[in-house]
Amino acid sequence: MIKVKGFEKQISQQNALSAIRKKLVGKTLNYKEIFSIMDQIAKQRLGEVLTTYFAASGYTQGFTNQELYFLTKAMIETGEKLHFKGIVADKHSIGGVPGNRTTLIVVPIIAAAGFLIPKSSSRAITTSGTADDMEILAPVILPKEKILKIVKKIKACIVWGGNFNIAPADDLIINVEKELMFESFDKIILSIMAKKVAFGANHVVIDLPYGQTLKVTHLKDAEILKNKFEYIAKKFNIKIRVLIHRTDEPVGRGIGPILETKDALKVLEQTPDKPLDLEIRSLTLAGNLLELCLKDSGQKLQGSVRENFGDCIGWATKILQDGSALKKMKEIIFEQGGNPNINSNKLIPGEFTYKFNAEKNCVIKDIDSKNLTLLVKALGAPLQKGSGVFLDKKEGEKVEKGETLCTLYSENVYNLRNGKKTIQEFPIFSFY
């Protein structure tokens, strides 16, 4: 019997390897072949080298819509799933925009409105992911039973899905992509939609930014992605809204786990120095997600929203401004095992700092997101939670000679030295 099991294991590995070779030369895979790859990755039988070959095949060859559906289905089927009743909301950004920590604002708004929003977030591929940031406020590695209990009690959670086998192949593929700092467009769709389906979501808003230094650089590529998201969503009976928008600079001013979380809390706390661009983007996402959910809600609630708030962005704005979202976020933090009394003033970045000052009078023209990502990684993020960059100046702002353009933070001298060197070799600012 042991020999039979060993033989079956060897056959499964060979099937996966054969499928990877087939994809590397540009051929189309069927569901059986795709399942064999996802199954072997999920069981950690391929190793990093072969997993990287598969990731590279998707980056160079791409997948048909049917292959993408098969990949999503296989990734879901090789892991666990959560089941909830009724409307289950979710949102996701495709990433690539430094500081875009809208999840920490959108989730409590949606939950405060009365809808379920169990949020499974990823670790960083580049500078920081939502799970990396939320971990500053509360544990994100929780057992399945605990998550179900929290969502039942307060309608929301913000956790890392990799802990309890939700689409396990995804996090293993992410680990091999980190070193090269890339994701294929198809892998972005696969990663997002597999976790949405596995977490039981049926009403989803996707934040799809494009810009010169982002993952998606052209509008036509963003539209292709949008169509693929809609195709996969339809296959799984998910109501989806994909929001495409031009993005030319980071969102907020803090880049790196603590600095990003600090920005998000400022928005929830409605402090005078809150980052307005982060607030506006969060309200846009929340408003659109509420609108999707409201369409499948009762007439009484629909009428109440129209009468009291005008539209769903007005509803989201009210929830944020009256403190309901902050109260809900504190509930989430408490239920996940964090300190609900935390506030933005208590989040202190790394002790080793460097102010990068302007050499002449100028106006900020552009901020290069790719170079900013390299800088933040050089400073030690995301493993060093306190490492990162605070943008003292952003696009369109006037700067006088000697004024600080940005402040570098790190948790040790070595990484700060790397950061100083990186910002000289890979400038993040261009000027008028």
Image: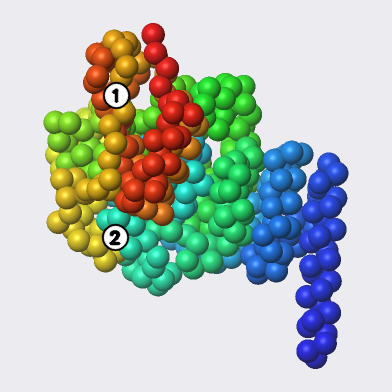
Q: In the image, which disc is placed on residue 91?
A: none
Indicate whether 65 appears above or below 276.
below
Quadrant including the N terminus: bottom right
Q: Is residue 73 visible?
A: yes
Q: Secondary structure at mark 1?
A: strand
Indicate whether 154 appears above or below 264.
below
List the residue tagged with mark 1. 357
Q: Earlier in the sequence, mark 1 or mark 2?
A: 2
List the residue tagged with mark 2. 138
**Closer to the camera, 309 or 413?**
413
Indicate whether 103 appears above or below 9.
above
The amino acid type found where label 1 is placed reads Asn
Q: Is residue 289 visible?
A: no
Q: Quadrant of residue 175?
A: bottom right
Expressed as whole percent of the image width and height from the top left, the position of residue 133 reads 35, 50
| Residue occupying the point 32% across, 37% down | 408
| Residue occupying the point 51% across, 51% down | 196
**Closer to the camera, 345 or 80?**
345
| Residue occupying the point 39% across, 42% down | 417
Indicate whether 11 appears above or below 314.
below
Q: Residues within 10 Å of mark 2 (few under 14, many from 20)?
A: many
Q: Secondary structure at mark 2?
A: loop
**Closer to the camera, 333 or 67?**
333
Q: Is residue 33 left or right of residue 69?
A: right
